[in-house]
Image (cartoon, helix red, strand yellow):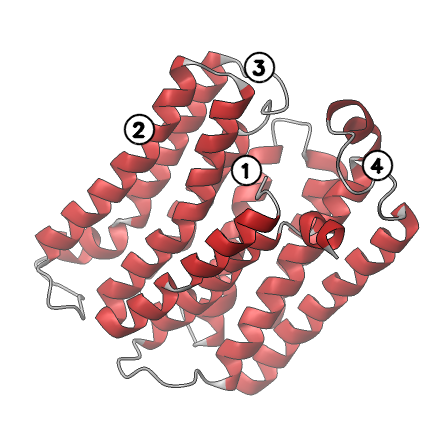
Amino acid sequence: MLHWLRLVRLPNLATAAADAVAGYLVVSGLQAVEWPPAACVLAVLASLGFYAAGMVLNDVYDLAIDRVERPERPLPSGAIAVGRASVVGHGLMAIGAAAACGAAVVSGSPWPAFVGAALTAAIWLYDRRAKSTPLGPPVMGACRGLNWLLGMTAAGGPTALHQWAIPLGMAVYVAGITLFARDEAGRSRRGTLIVAAAAMALGLGMAAGHVWLPLSEGVTTLATRLPAATWLVLWGVLATSIILRAVVAIADPAPGRVRAAVGNAIMSIITLDAVLVLASCGEPWAIVVLMLLGFFLVGRHLVPPT
């Protein structure tokens, strides 16, 4: 079972669920903590199915490379048969697609199904074609942005221009993480790491547009008791901590330091999602999203996130 959990990157499933939940909450603006509607649950199920499928199929298509660079992985080591992993990966993809269609039916909007179809195409494109090309990081970033949209469309959104800043910003942020991790199996090139860290910083700044875009027009959309300026400071502190960890790896691009920076940037997605929910729904729901961090931390002790 540990081999399968390693194959699907168990800790990272919490980040996928956090995106879908946060996307739904940002659009719906729910205040009271209660069991989420069926559309939200189905969007989360779709998100988990798509993410797990992408991870499994990633290793299926990477088998030849992993035999050289990561022979300890479940497939090259022979712990899991490649054919079985392929069947499971495509089955998980089908579950994700079915759940996205279910979210479309329950929400009364076709958009979750369209987003699910786009995610299917993006995951296949990344795993099968784009990964080793310059398109790899943007396509992976698009997967994360679409994951946010999965939850947002299940709630009938995005309903305002500033809400689009979140999926776009998180897409750029994850594209930066993907570029940062490109050579993590060996010694990374410092120039690539610098560009990747800059992309991560740019994406974090774009996502904050969810708050500062309305604020620039004299409007605040915050549901929290925090002033908008305080929220922006909080976001800035989180962003700075992520980038500083990346700077440490840039100074010494050894595999261990790069992997640590990548793992920290992935884990921080949950905290970032919680802070974005804080702006739209207040403290109770932000705490609920933040609790997914516990799942990530426990899962990280069982299997590595990268």
Amino acid at circle 2: Leu
State the separation of the CA atoms marked 4 and 1. Answer: 30 Å
State the separation of the CA atoms marked 3 and 2. Answer: 19 Å
Sequence-wise, the earlier of marks 4 and 3 is 4
Sequence-wise, the earlier of marks 4 and 2 is 4
Sequence-wise, the earlier of marks 3 and 2 is 3
Q: Residue at x 82, y 41 (%)?
A: 75
Sequence-wise, the earlier of marks 3 and 1 is 1
Residue at the disc numbered 3: 187
- Residue 111, visible in the rendered structure: no
State the separation of the CA atoms marked 3 and 1. Answer: 22 Å
Sequence-wise, the earlier of marks 2 and 1 is 1
State the separation of the CA atoms marked 2 and 1. Answer: 23 Å
Q: Quadrant of the C terminus?
A: top right
State the separation of the CA atoms marked 4 and 3. Answer: 23 Å
In the image, residue 105 sits, relative to residue 60, either above or below, namely below
Residue depth check, mark 4 versus mark 1: number of the one nearer the observer: 4
Question: Viewer-proximal residue, 284 or 236?
Answer: 284
SS category of the residue bearing label 1: helix
Residue at the disc numbered 4: 77
Check contact, mark 4 vs mark 1: CB within 8 A. no
Amino acid at circle 3: Arg
Q: Residues within 10 Å of mark 1 (few under 14, many from 20)?
A: many
SS category of the residue bearing label 2: helix
In the image, residue 198 sits, relative to residue 30, either above or below, namely above
Q: Residue at x 26, y 50 (%)?
A: 209
Amino acid at circle 1: Pro
Q: Residues within 10 Å of mark 4 (few under 14, many from 20)?
A: some
Residue depth check, mark 4 versus mark 2: number of the one nearer the observer: 4
Q: Residues within 10 Å of mark 2 (few under 14, many from 20)?
A: few
Residue at the disc numbered 2: 244
Q: Residue at x 48, y 41 (%)?
A: 174
